[in-house]
Image (cartoon, rainbow, N blue to C red):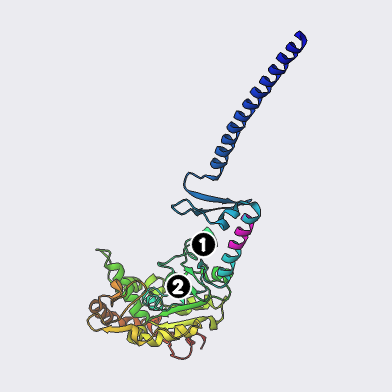
Amino acid sequence: MELRKGSWKIVILVCALIIYLWMLFVDHSHVLTDISQKITLQRTRVPSRTVLYQGSDRSRIEDVPPDGRTDSKKLQSFSPRNVSGTLEGGILEYQTLKQQGLIPSRQLPTALIIGVKKGGTRALLEFLRLHPAIRAAGSEVHFFDHHYVKGFRWYRRRMPPTLIGQITMEKTPSYFVTSEVPKRVKHMNPGMKLIVVVRDPVTRAISDYTQVKSKRRKMPRFEDLAFLNGSKIVDTSWMPLKIGVYVRHLERWLQYFPLSQFLFVSGERLIADPVTEVTRVQDFLGLKRVICEKHFYFNATKGFPCLLKSEDRATPHCLGRIVENRSSQRELADRIENKLLHGKNGFAKVSKNLIRHRSENNFVGPLK
């Protein structure tokens, strides 16, 4: 009996120990479950209330609705396979849109207005901006004469974004008279279309002179600068006159580009009949004739055609400082034109023969 009583005690102790261990195990399992749930919640929660999709080399963040609910399709993207598929789909979609020309990008220009200063280049560019297929740099870039060492990437960044089918263009009048420019332009694009706005060289020189004089209080008379030492010999090295000897500059350009890639626009006709000249430019660029009479009106007070609307303004306006002091220029022209015409080197007579504008044919004067 004593042995049986002793064995019962052992059995009771063993059972008590088993029950204690079982209760301890159950309690510990609850603790582990709570911890695992907290870790799971922390892993699936992003402080900024966004779901982050990560791939091997890219990441995409998509907003979660304010109620905290997410679409089951979005949650599936947590798997690496779904993430890579989503990214590849986005890239393919972007490439497709880009190929279709629906995503704008900056391109190097395919057409340049290369001159001449005070010939009407700004007016022409503003008129061309009316065309939806033309996108132009906002200001003179001076890449080929001043900033060429900065490279084509720098140049491209100065261009406006364009879609496929649009023409990128820029205007810098000094290109026409800078000796290094033709070779540099051909290096970038041998098929470049080149537009030159030319004007009566005497009128152009006077306009150039009066613009500089308006900024300087003390400036010699035009005659003192245009003629060598008070003689009748015209100083064609003086820049306002040097620019007007168009044949010299054109011969340099023709060493790199055929005449068929040039279009010479009449600065005088651009004022008197802008539609005719702009139509020639549209044809030269291979564009539909969009710019027409409805875009212009003539301001009799200023003596210039103005725009009913433009790229920047939807209201009628003229081109600001493009209007010149015509009375002072006319007075100066009357005083010196005969001197230039009858000068020993015949500057004006020769130059005028070089400006043969034809509405249907190109400029062919220097070749005859």
SS class, disc 2: strand
Q: Is residue 24 left or right of residue 338?
A: right
Q: Residue 355's spot in the image, x, y percent?
A: 42, 85
Residue 341 appears in the figure: no
Q: Is residue 346 left or right of residue 213?
A: right
Residue 166 appears in the figure: yes
Q: Residue 333's spot in the image, x, y percent?
A: 28, 80
Q: Residue 134's spot in the image, x, y percent?
A: 45, 76
Q: Which residue is mark 1?
A: 148
Which numbered mark, 1 or 2, is in the foreground of this view?
2
Q: How many marks?
A: 2
Q: Which mark is residue 102?
A: none
Q: Earlier in the sequence, mark 1 or mark 2?
A: 2
Q: In terms of depth relative to the viewer, which is nearer, 127 or 237?
A: 127
- Check disc 1 and give the amino acid type: Tyr
Q: In terms of depth relative to the viewer, which is nearer, 134 or 244?
A: 134
Task: Please give the range of residues in magenta.
Answer: 83-90
- Using the image, determine if residue 1 lies above or below residue 236: above
SS class, disc 1: helix
Residue neighbourhood size for the residue with mark 1, other residues' Cα within 10 Å, grouped as few (<14), some (14–19), many (≥20): some
Name which quarter of the figure residue 98 lies in.
Answer: bottom right
Q: CA distance from mark 1 to mark 2?
A: 22 Å
> Which residue is pictured at 33% across the width and 86% down the height?
272
Whether residue 147 is in magenta: the answer is no
Q: Which residue is mark 2?
A: 135
- Check disc 2 and give the amino acid type: Arg
